[in-house]
Amino acid sequence: MSSHDPFDDLETELTALGGLLDLPSPPPADVAAAVRARLETPPPEGESVTHLPAPGRRKDVRRTRRARWKIVAAVVIAVVAVTAATPQGRAAVARVLRFAGIELELGDRPPTPVRTTANLPGEHTVAPGDLPALVRFKVGTPAELGAPGHATVSDQGRVVSLFWPGGVRLDQFQGGVDPFFFKKLGPPWPEYVQVNQAQGWWIPGAHPLGYIQRTDGSPIPLRQAAPTLIWQRDTITYRLEGAGTKERAIQIAESLR
C-alpha cells in the first residue's frame, strides 16, 4: 500500500478551490465569517481531521480521506450558501461551484432548455454482470431499485451508468476537484443535503447537462437532464437522475450497496 499521506494534497486542493472564487472586491465579510465558522466547527467525537493513520491501516486511510473531503466540501457549502443569497453573489458564483468532479454554473435565471441529445464520450452498452471486469472501482446498485434494465460504460471505463424504467439513471465515477460533468443551473437553487453521512446536493429543476472533455474551445454537447441528486462516498461520485422528489432520491441513494 502506498505511504502517501491522504492530506498531502489538501492545501493544493483548497488553493485551487480559492482560485475558482471570483467574488466582488472587497469580499463580503459574511462570506469570510461563514467559511471560518464551517472550518472551526469541531469534528464529531471519535473523528479527527488531523489524525494521520499508520501505514497499512486501510480503514483509517478511508476515514482520513472522507475527513479531507468534508473540509473541502465545507468551504464550498459555506461560500455557495452565502453568495447565492444575493444578486451580486449569484453573479460571482457563476462558473465557481465544483463538487466532486461536477461543475455547477449558476446564473440569475433558469437556463434555456436544450433539445439536443448528448451521449458520453465512448459510451457503449454492456451487460451489468460484466461491469466488475470493465472498471476500476466497485459499482454500486440501489437496493430500492433492484437490478438495472441495462448499463453503459463511458470514457474508457471512467463512468458507469445504470438505467431503470421511467427515466431513472445512476451515473457513478471516480470524482475529484477537476470537473467532468457540467451543469447549467438557475432558480430553483441547488439544496444541500445529506445521504447517510455523505454530503451532497439536490438539484430540483431540469437543466442542461454535458460532459467536459474537450480542450480545443469547441462547444460542449448538452442534453436536458431531469432533477438530480449528486453525492460522494469515499472517492466515488454518484449522480441520480429521474427519481422524482428529493425525498425519494435520498431514499434510493441511501439504499446503495
Image: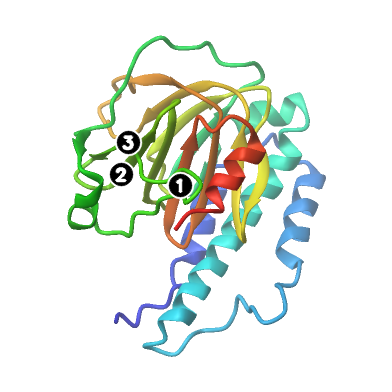
Tell me which amino acid carries mark 2: Val
Picture quarter containing residue 257? Answer: bottom left
Residue 108, visible in the rendered structure: yes
Q: Quadrant of the N terminus?
A: bottom left
* Disc nearer the start of the sequence (2/1): 2
Q: Determine the residue located farthest toward the front in the rendered image.
A: 146
Using residue 174 as the reference point, say whether residue 71 is left or right of it: right
For the point 38% across and 27% down, the residue is 210
> Label 3 vs label 1: CA separation?
18 Å
Residue 46 rendering spot, x and y as whole percentages? 67, 82
Asked which colour scheme the image uses, the reply is: rainbow
Using residue 99 as the reference point, say whether residue 163 is left or right of it: left
Residue 90 rendering spot, x and y as whole percentages? 68, 28
* Disc nearer the start of the sequence (2/3): 3
Tell me which amino acid carries mark 3: Gly
* Disc nearer the start of the sequence (3/1): 3
Q: Which residue is mark 2?
A: 159
- In front here: 209 or 128? 128
Secondary-structure class at tag 1: strand
Q: Which residue is mark 1?
A: 238
For the point 65% across and 26% down, the residue is 91
Residue 224 rendering spot, x and y as whole percentages? 45, 19
Q: Which residue is mark 3?
A: 149
Residue 198 rendering spot, x and y as whole percentages? 58, 57
Is residue 60 positioned above or below 32 on the image? below
Secondary-structure class at tag 2: strand
> Label 2 vs label 1: CA separation?
10 Å
- In front here: 228 or 55? 228
Using residue 167 as the reference point, say whether residue 106 is left or right of it: right
